[in-house]
Amino acid sequence: MAAPRTLTDIYGPDIAVCARPAQEPTVPSSRHRIMRDVLSARPLAVAAGTPVISSAGGTEPNLIAALRDGGLPVGTDPREFRTEAEFATRVTEALSDGLRLSMEYPQPTSLYPDERSVKSAELVGYLNNKASISTFVAPRFQARREIVATEDLALAAPAEKSWVLKAATNAAHGASLDVYLHRAGDLVALPAFTDILTEVVVEEYLSIHRNWGVQLYVAADGQARLLAVTDQRIDSDGIYTGGRFGLVVPLPADLLVECLAIAQRAADVGYRGMCSLDCAETHDGRLVMLDLNFRITSGSIPLLALHTIRPDALDRPSESTKITTTASVAALLAALRPALLRGGLLVTGGHDTRRTDNPIKQTTLHLLVFGDDPDDVATRRAALENMYNH
């Protein structure tokens, strides 16, 4: 099977993609609104003929033009919404059109029933629940972790020790909002999800030597396949900040075999779509699975883009990054135009809140920096972040 370049290659016909996390019932609608809208628009760059239920912030004309100018298979059927009410309307319309929906995050069955979905909300939630990893991962690749009632956190996660806290929930809202890293001796500032959940996962703190993102997909035939292996850039808080593509340190063979097996286990219980498995090698030589991300991720779109714009040179260096600014997306793209014309820079997505009813003015732009020299690629990526992120 040829490597996929578009969502249509993976999902097949008569499927609409919904990549927006659900609004959690106990959380104010304004919280995480921008993140949820940005994620909804992320698949547009590589959607081709697949309908995408997307925030109108991702369909800004200058942004769509930049995606097309880069040679990407931009979605031809965006189902845009500007408000929460319009989001529900777009879902209802897609169902009325006879489309089945591929939810990347679990949505309530009151919005659309499981029988109209490519995979059930329960399955999507379970696969992404931080407490479910032991079900799909062989014991030798598991980090030490335990499920703890939030009321017992003080005993299970003391300030004098290092640990990682993860949300044990089927909400699977992503965007690093469900992980908290604590280093021994630091002040403990528990994340918001501990106020909502009754139980969480406490995981051992690992001294990581290498960190990979194994990008896979399960097409309509139910067979798990490898798309690529990437390096992951992680900041001091353990949060993903972008990927490195090409010239990646090879993944140990037994870890790669396990990643394919994990994806196939999920496929065998009904999963279809893209997934990214975060894994690592520790300084003491252990190979561990860190997270199972059964959804379109930050690494998925750049890889499909690379398969489109330079399919014969995927081993050349490239890095993805994200710019966040208060300027409009039109102004940001105008400032970036000289760099885009010079080459080695590709817009892979974005969002401008000005096209929604969100009163907060914020633009997000996803970029891919590529070239032949890894140091030059890293330097240009860092310069973009330093210049525009504010």
Image (spheres, grey):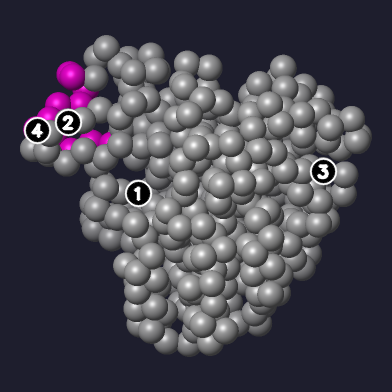
Image quadrant where one finds the C terminus: bottom left
- Work out how far the residue at label 4 is from the one at label 2, CA to CA, in angstroms: 10 Å
Residue 1 spot, x, y in % from top left: 78, 64
State which tag comes first along the sequence, 4 or 1. 4
Q: Amino acid at mark 2?
A: Val
State which tag comes first along the sequence, 3 or 4. 3
Callout 3: SS: strand
- Work out how far the residue at label 4 is from the one at label 1, CA to CA, in angstroms: 22 Å
**Front position among marks 4 and 1:** 1
Q: Amino acid at mark 4?
A: Glu
Which residue in the structure is indicated by mark 3?
15
Is residue 267 among the parts visible in the rendering? no
Which residue in the structure is indicated by mark 1?
239
Q: Amino acid at mark 3?
A: Ile
**Front position among marks 4 and 2:** 2
Q: Is 206 left, or right, of 274 in this rendering?
A: left
Labelled disc at residue 160: 4
Whether tag 1 and tag 2 are in contact, CB under 8 A, the answer is no
- Work out how far the residue at label 1 is from the one at label 2, CA to CA, in angstroms: 17 Å
In the image, the segment drawn in magenta is: 154-164
Residue 292 spot, x, y in % from top left: 50, 42
- Work out how far the residue at label 3 is from the one at label 4, CA to CA, in angstroms: 50 Å
Q: Residue at x 51, y 65 (%)?
A: 331
Report crowding for label 2: few under 14, some 14 to 19, many 20 or more residues within 10 A (C-alpha).
some
67 in relation to 312, above or below: above
Callout 4: SS: loop
Residue 382 spot, x, y in % from top left: 34, 71
State which tag comes first along the sequence, 1 or 3. 3
